[in-house]
Image (cartoon, coloured by chain):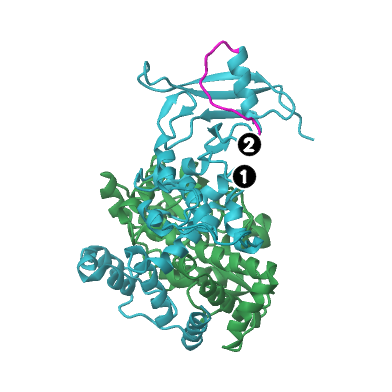
Chain colours: A cyan, B green
Amino acid sequence: MKSSPEFVSAKIYRYDPTVESSPRYEIFEVPYERQMRVLDVLDYVAENCGVGIGYRWFCGVKRCGMCGVKVNGKPVLACWEKAMPSMVIEPLPNMPVIRDLVVDRSAFERATLAMNPCLERKKPHEAFPEPLTHKDFADAFKLMNCIECYVCTAACPVLADADHRDFAGPASFVQLAKVALHPKDEGNRVARALKGDIYACVSCYQCSNVCPVGINVLEDAIEKLKRQCATQAPLNREVREGQIFSDIIKEFGRVHPPTLMRRAKGLLQSISKFFLVVTMYRKGKVQRRPQTVEGIDDIRKLFEVVEKSR
Amino acid sequence: MKFAYFPGCSAKTTCPELDQAMQAVAKTMDFDLWEIEAAACTGARQLRDSNEELFLTLNARTLALAEQLERNVLTVCATCLLNLTEVNETLRRNPDLRKKINRNLSEVGLEYQGSSDVTHLLWVLLRDIGVEELGRRIVRPLHGLRVAPYYGCHILRPKDVLGFDDPDSPTSLDTLIRLLGAEPVSYDGKMRCCGFHILMSKEDVALKISGRRLTEARDGGSDCIVTTCPLCHTSLDPYQRAAASKLGTKFNLPIIHLPQLLGLGLGLDPQELKLDGNVVSTAPVLEKILRSA
């Protein structure tokens, strides 16, 4: 049996941008109690260590979504994360720090508002009650557990590594998908998804991985929104590129990168890759012509079968 | 060990050195690989983002072809691993959906049963062969080489589907590097994204992401990075120069495929492993190994 530590060591990020020029860290030794959470550690420090540490929480039971922090590199909810013997506690990344562990989420909250995440209907249903089955409702229902804690947005590499601020972030897409997948909604959700630059998503599953309420953000929100884009916005550039990818599989069974590049980007942009292509060609990484896989007839047949069933 | 081998598009086009190294390693390790030559692309992210039924049908076909061989599928591509595993798990769990997909497959005389598993070279090495047996096979320890393990995303996440390693602090590749006698470099980004899946549509964003990974590995003092997926390899190797100029810096980091690094430890000749097929020269790595040997 593992013995519990007597103390936990918490290295806490301290920063007040109104008076300090750069952040610093302070280390606190906190007496360990059974089933201690990160929030309990923060409470102890605030109440007993004589420092006015800034952190935010409200419900303490994974409902309000206010206590997001980064613990040992991973965005989590302080109220739901168990205390570790040694912790580095920092504010959520991708958002400006107001003080210590308190961040300003307003940029992403505005992105969520821009999605207008409430049902849009042209006119009320004529009869009462309006029929609605569990099955119709299932996809949207999965997303209703979202507590808007923005922990997923804090974990996103498109924001963290590339600082690509056109991207609305996963949390806002969950709110959008919640209505877009709702059978009663009639709003133009695809336009909003594209405005939030949904195709900048790198499909890395970090959002799904950190979600405190277990929503598979990538597959159950972002991917399903992309499927709506694919059917409703066929002229969008990224949708068209996806279609070209699919057409190439139908034609050859396998992707041939030069063909994909030429068809998706056009000759001019492909030429801008001249040096890269030459380098790769020299290394045997570019085949001039696409090779067709053995079972191509069956593959094409399946494309047609699925097409017909749609 | 017998496998239905699924190299994926990348190992057949942009990363032929990966396919060659895998075949060379298989020979030494006594793997019996039967390549599923009739298989289609697993669709990367594009197919599943646009047409779920087609995604399920094409991958169920690949799995059905492996089932005919009565073998588990072995892949060297993490995205293929995830796509095939996910389709397998979805269809195993959902009999109604399986019936529907099998109706499609019946048009080409196939039936998916769910009897084959999908695995990756890294998993086979550590789970099936095991550290002890593998350790006995290492004849050329890579002493003194500092290797940055790069896991990427689709071999770790989603954990409930893949479940082999911890997505927040993975250790399997680190273990393997240590077993090979080399030293794993600890750096922040080993389980973060390489940006590949938006490399075509949003190159600027993708290069900033891959550039961050390269910076972390370089600043950690790595001699090279080892990858488990040819898509990550493409982001980090052929596009390394582009990432460097995007970030206004310089990298000279050889990016080595997992079977290439393993092959070196198994005593294979660098030529057999096509180490001259990587874009960033692997010569400094070979020099270091041969000097210490």
User: Measuring 40% from the left and 31% from the top, which residue is drawn there?
Assistant: A96
Tell me the crowding category of disc 2: few under 14, some 14 to 19, or many 20 or more residues within 10 angstroms, Cα based. some
Tell me the crowding category of disc 1: few under 14, some 14 to 19, or many 20 or more residues within 10 angstroms, Cα based. some
Magenta residues, start to end: A49-61
Residue denoted by label 2 = A62
Residue B29 rendering spot, x and y as whole percentages: 60, 68
Cβ–Cβ under 8 Å for marks 1 and 2: yes
Q: Residue furthest right?
A: A1
Q: Are marks 1 and 2 on the same chain?
A: yes
The residue closer to the viewer here, B169 or A65, is: A65
Please identify the dominant SS of the magenta region. Answer: loop
Q: Is A58 in the magenta?
A: yes
Residue B250 rendering spot, x and y as whole percentages: 28, 46
The residue closer to the viewer here, A282 or A216, is: A216
**Which comes sooner in the sequence, label 1 or label 2?**
2
The residue closer to the viewer here, A166 or A298, is: A166
User: Identity of the amino acid at label 1?
Assistant: Val
Residue B255 rendering spot, x and y as whole percentages: 41, 56
